[in-house]
Amino acid sequence: MFYTIRPKTRLLAGAAVLLASLAPALALAQTASPDPANALLIAILVKRGVISRSDADSIMHEVAAEQEEAKAQAAVPVPSTVTTSSVSPDGTIHVTYVPKIVRDQITRQVKNEVLAQEQAQGYAAPDQMPDWVRHVRIYGDFRARYETDLFPKGNDNSGAFPNFNAVNTGSPYDTSTANNNFPPSNNVDQNRTRFRIRARLGVDADLGDGFEVGFRLATGENDSPVSENQTLGGAPGGAQGGDFSKYAIWIDRAHIDYSPPFLDPNVAKLTISVGRFDNPFFSTNLLFADDLGFDGIAADGSYKLDDGVTPFFTLGAFPIYNTDFNFASNQPAKYASHDKYMFGAQGGAEWKIDDDYTAKLAVANYAYTNVTGKLSAPCTVLSAADPCSTDDDRPSFAQNGNTYMALRDIVANTANSNGTTNQYQYFGLASNFDDLALDGEFDLSNFDPTHLWVVGEYVKNLAFKKSDIASKAVNNRGPVTATSATGD
């Protein structure tokens, strides 16, 4: 069907409306004749003498040729009802009418071509996720519980067991006889009940070429390295919460891993991790808490032998504490750095005896540097704000059961009444640590999918010497002797 439009002023407005309605369909077709609106524009230019009729015909033919070439490249068939628009010698413009059924066909065809191109490039496809999504794993978990901590009757609540971690993470404690205040202490005889939650959300992404990254956020009422629990309505004293206040989220894991892509993972494995990641060692919570994250760098690998034995190893260096860059911050003269590290090395083997039995054995050494307390240079402290040279040797986190020593060598003088006042003290670990660990596991899978594991771990501190710490320990609670008011 064709419309014939004479170049008269009163017809131009109606023609423009008609051509505007046809423009989207003609643009979708891409292989149709020159745009009717363009043809109308050229006709107007001819009528006003801007261009000659021969130039107009040349332009129309050139546009038609280019569209035919584009049609051939795209291999899109042109519906039989679409013809070329042109300007006749008398100025008449012929505009093709494209039926709705043809426009719908063009739309479907273009849509199919776009989807095919997107699928080929890995962006999208019907009922299929983009390729990059398959390399990202989002995970998380949530736990809620109500717990009761029960203490037996008769525990010593006299204050004989100070909370050394509270002292070391806060202000120093005045140990002088003039101080009648008790030091911070742990609860030993009053039952407590608590609602607690733990929420974690993480993402692992495969970057290709053997690289992966991991990131995880977690709750926690403080930055404790061994727990992500958040007590609901947490009370003052270092715990957040209470009065329906909001809770903080902590960076729990953040690491990048590299595994050489040329290794066959069914035979040999090697992974190098940097950042904050899960415990890389085969161990139990006798040494390391289940939720503990390791900061530093680690490498672990394995190689499967033909007889079902798979030797493995793990090596790592882990900064435990990095000295404050400006220590001591309130003194112009700075003190030497005492960065603390743990270096670990483990070797072992896993033996698949048969389909139902697997044994795993390993030996490891964990050597610690600068974690042992060191007596400071002689110093005078007149208040809790005064520092001494080895204050940074105190542990920034410790749990119960450690043996401590006094860190500050406070000079007795008239400023402290010859040592009877102003004895503000911090405490460090009295022993060296160089742990030898033997780990074993026996897996019985006779009742698959139910498994039975027998696990054992033996640990010995090779650096422990009782004679070295007996003279400086401040919290041993053995039998009191004539030479030790606190026992040994």
Image (cartoon, rainbow, N blue to C red):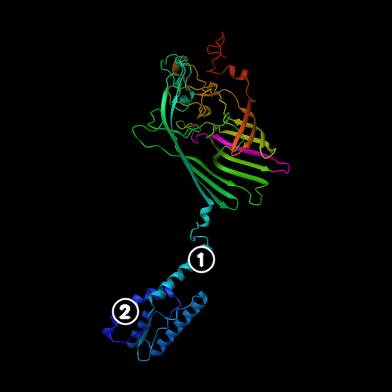
| Viewer-proximal residue among 146 and 40 | 146
Spot occupied by residue 93 in the image (x, y as percentages of width and height):
36, 86
Q: Is residue 286 left or right of residue 312?
A: left
The answer to which quarter of the image holds residue 457 is: top right
Spot occupied by residue 488 in the image (x, y as percentages of width and height):
57, 14
Q: Is residue 12 above or below residue 481?
A: below
| Viewer-proximal residue among 216 and 105 | 105
Q: For mark 1, does the 10 Å Cα neighbourhood hold few (<14), some (14 to 19), or many (20 or more) residues?
A: some
Between label 1 and label 2, give the one nearer the viewer: 1
Number of the label disc, if any, that sits on residue 16: 2
Spot occupied by residue 246 in the image (x, y as percentages of width and height):
37, 37
Q: Is residue 124 left or right of residue 286?
A: left
Task: Farthest residue to the front: give it.
Answer: 447
Q: Check residue 321 for magenta coloring.
A: yes
Query: Which residue is identified by label 1?
Result: 116
User: Start and end of the magenta stretch?
Assistant: 304-327
